[in-house]
């Protein structure tokens, strides 16, 4: 079973035929909202809005552990995460859709592991390739079929939020090799890996990062929301192909 975690601008999937909703509980508390079970293009899928259904949970307060734990409890093996980002790399301009292949964690104070007690039998999770290569391929192939341009690869800088970044911070992330910046990629990516889930992100560039493009003096949130809304239509058409695609 495949699950989709929707981010800003994607708190619902208009083309999802909902069969039922279920409130989930986990040893880590409650997920962001009820799981929506349904079919997309006749393929079974579970949908969860990461920030809750009224977009009320800020990135640093999302219960990432509960979200992923509950998805796994439902038999989910693959998770496609939708996340908005600011573009740092010159080619990642507003409206671009990108499937990152690496991630750097700048977050702090979040519950970032399931191995959180002294008696836990832990392993050092291999994080060499943070995103599932097969699922990334499947997304890129789907974008191709849906005729939606999609950038293959890039480094996602995961920041704490909820504030946006200073120009100096963006310069630092760029020096570190990051091409985009967002607030939800971690610990979600690492937790998915701990649970053995195949996980990949579809990142939607909704603004130039601070100091890039025309954002020398600030970021216009109205523009950000308009770009997110329009781009999510394109993401939906990619998702329809992803759920229908064999393999991966
Ligand atoms: N910075 C951090 N997170 C973001 C941004 C940004 O510019 N845009 C969307 N999420």
Image: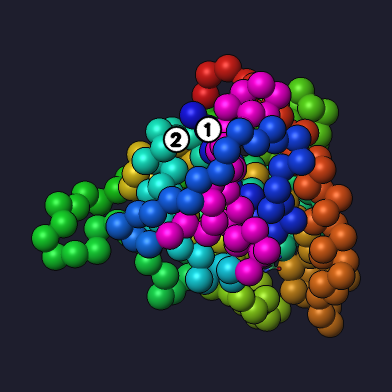
> Dot 1 corresponds to which residue?
2
User: Residue 174, percent across and down?
Assistant: 63, 65
- Please tell me which residue is depicted at 76% across the width and 26% down the height of the picture: 144
Please provide percent x and percent y for residue 5: 58, 47
Picture coordinates of residue 28, whole percent (x, y): 34, 60
33 in the magenta segment: yes
Residue drawn 53% across and 32% down? 2
Residue for badge 2: 76
Residue numbers of the magenta segment: 30-56
Total tally of numbered discs in the picture: 2
* Secondary element type, mark 1: strand
> Closer to the camera, 113 or 46?
46
Q: Whole-percent x and y of residue 180?
A: 66, 58
On whether residue 44 falls in the magenta region, the answer is yes
- The reply to whether residue 101 is in sight is no
Marks 2/1: CA–CA distance: 6 Å
Instruction: Give the color scheme: rainbow, by chain, secondary structure or one colour.
Output: rainbow
Question: Nearest the camera: 132 or 65?
Answer: 65
Side (left or right) of 219 relative to 200: right
- Ligand 1's quadrant is bottom right
Asked if the residue under mark 1 is in contact with the one under mark 2, i.e. CB atoms within 8 Å, the reply is yes
Disc assigned to residue 37: none
Residue at (84, 82) in percent of width and height = 217
Question: In this image, 110 relative to 92: left or right?
Answer: left
Task: Name above or below for residue 184 compared with residue 10.
Answer: below
Give the residue at x 71% y 42%: 13
Q: Estimate how packed mark 1 is, as few (under 14), some (14 to 19) or many (20 or more) residues with alpha carbons within 10 Å.
A: some
Farthest residue toward the top?
246
């Amino acid at each position: 079973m495949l699950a989709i975690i929707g981010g800003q601008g994607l708190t619902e999937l208009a083309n999802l035929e909902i069969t039922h909703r279920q409130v989930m509980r986990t040893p880590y508390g409650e997920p962001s909202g009820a799981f929506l079970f349904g079919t997309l293009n006749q393929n079974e899928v579970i949908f969860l809005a990461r920030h809750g259904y009224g977009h009320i949970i800020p990135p640093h307060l999302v219960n990432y552990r509960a979200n992923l734990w509950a998805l796994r409890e439902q038999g989910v093996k693959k998770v496609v995460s939708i996340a908005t980002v600011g573009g740092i790399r010159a080619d990642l301009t507003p409206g671009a859709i990108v499937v990152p292949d690496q991630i750097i964690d700048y977050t702090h104070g979040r519950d970032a592991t399931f191995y959180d007690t002294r008696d836990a039998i832990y392993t050092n999770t291999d994080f060499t390739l943070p995103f599932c290569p097969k699922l990334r391929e499947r997304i890129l192939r789907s974008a191709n079929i849906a005729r939606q341009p999609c950038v293959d690869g890039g480094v996602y800088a995961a920041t704490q939020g909820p504030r946006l970044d200073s120009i100096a911070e963006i310069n630092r992330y760029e020096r570190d090799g990051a091409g985009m910046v967002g607030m939800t990629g971690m610990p979600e990516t690492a937790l998915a890996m701990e649970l053995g889930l195949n996980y990949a992100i579809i990142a939607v560039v909704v603004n130039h990062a601070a100091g890039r493009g025309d954002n020398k003096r600030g970021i216009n949130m109205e523009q950000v929301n308009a770009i997110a809304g329009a781009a999510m239509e394109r993401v939906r058409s990619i998702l329809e192909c992803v759920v229908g695609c064999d393999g991966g």
